[in-house]
Image (cartoon, rainbow, N blue to C red):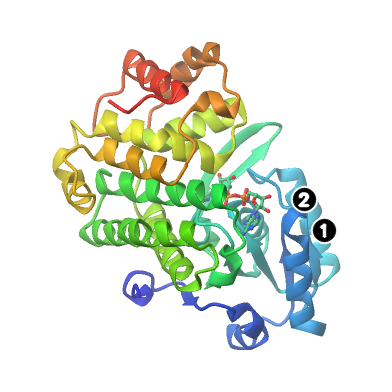
Amino acid sequence: MLDTTQFSNDQTVAFGAGLRRNFAEHLRTSGYERPLILTTPQQCELGLELAEILGASAAGVFSKATMHTPTDVTDEALVHLRDVKADSVLSIGGGSTIGLGKALVLHTDIGHIALPTTYAGSECTPILGQTENGVKTTMTDPKLRPGIVLYDAELVATLPAAMTITSALNAMAHAVEALYAKDRTETATQLALEGIAAFQTSLPAVMENPGDLAARQATQEGAWACGTVLGQVGMALHHKLCHTLGGSLNLPHAETHAIVLPHATAFNQPAAAEELAPLADLFGASDLARALWDFAKSLDAPTALKDLGVEEADLDRVADLATQNPYRNPREITKDGIRALLGRAWEGAAPQ
Ligand code: NAD
């Protein structure tokens, strides 16, 4: 198992299938007494299960978490949090639910315990993306990183196959970009490689048997490693493209990452060959982008933006937006280069 204490001193992290059933014990050692449980509407049942486990300690369940953390939902949750006199939030879900937990911490001094149910990695970062009147802004503040993260493998065992693979590729994308980040460190590089290796070995086993809890836990270790590097170093072209596609066309987060990753890697690998070499070695490939594409296809991941409902006519506008205020990137970004990349990702063609 990856040694979480080696890399994050300001976060308590635990792994274990079924550990949510001992949540009352985790709460006692956390020092918090009365958490408000947060979920999406789709995962309300899970919130109710935790409320039952906590009994009188639960301050209630707020189940309106929504993708991209709209501020009107946060405002409603804040009123509820104060009404029920909660001293902490317990976010059970993916990046959307954990995002709501972070937004509540931003406005209060409460504690945050996260039980992730996807591999997106928000629980490891001090980053919060919020939407107000349709405009998404992102901020970073150390207090936003949840203090306690409990990875219960049973919670990801319910992820449908399609979400399992797209969410895993979303996590792997953090690690790929960490390898060539301008502010990369040896620690982040090591962690990024360990995270991808964990997914590379455990994902096929999980796809074969979704209920394999040992393999599911290995994927969560990968998610923790990839999410931790997302919180430590700056992201580049891949994340810029996904944020632009997601923001301007309202595309699903994980699927967009899954489709774009091989193409963004193909664009950057000539300029970051040395940094990406250990990853190419891990896949036993000379062309990493092609290896990532083959890996995704072998697991039936989506490969074409057109299958997400993107119109070819949208691509020029996305290329324009993605080349405005670009993130730091190892290779110079040109509108023509990005438009060609997007064309291949739209079509579902092999990366080049
Ligand atoms: P999500 O949280 O939006 O979940 C997508 C859907 O899947 C929801 O309906 C959810 O209820 C459901 N779901 C989640 N786990 C499930 C499970 N185990 N079984 C069945 N259904 C399940 O998806 P996500 O990809 O985890 O998060 C995306 C959001 O998180 C985006 O808004 C993204 O910007 C944000 N994000 C933020 C960071 C950060 O560091 N701030 C990092 C990654 C993602």
x and y percentages locating residue 106 in the rendered image? 62, 57
Is 169 left, or right, of 248 in this rendering?
Answer: left
Name the element at disc 1: helix
Compared with 265, 352 (above or below) is above
Q: CA distance from mark 2 to mark 1?
A: 7 Å
Residue 328 visible? The answer is no
Residue at 38%, 45% in the rendered image: 173
Quarter of the view holding residue 34: bottom right
View extreme (right): residue: 83
Q: Amino acid at mark 2?
A: Asp
Compared with 28, 59 (above or below) is above
Name the element at disc 2: helix
Q: How busy is the neighbourhood of tag 2: few (under 14 within 10 Å), some, or many (20 plus)?
A: some
Determine which residue is flagged by label 1. Answer: 79
Q: Which of these two is toward me, 267 or 79?
A: 267
The quarter of the rendered structure image containing the N terminus is bottom left
Q: Are marks 2 and 1 in contact (CB under 8 Å)?
A: yes
Determine which residue is flagged by label 2. Answer: 75
Is 92 left, or right, of 313 in this rendering?
Answer: right
Residue at 57%, 16% in the rendered image: 311
The quarter of the rendered structure image containing the C terminus is top left
x and y percentages locating residue 206 in the rendered image? 47, 61
Compared with 323, 58 (above or below) is below
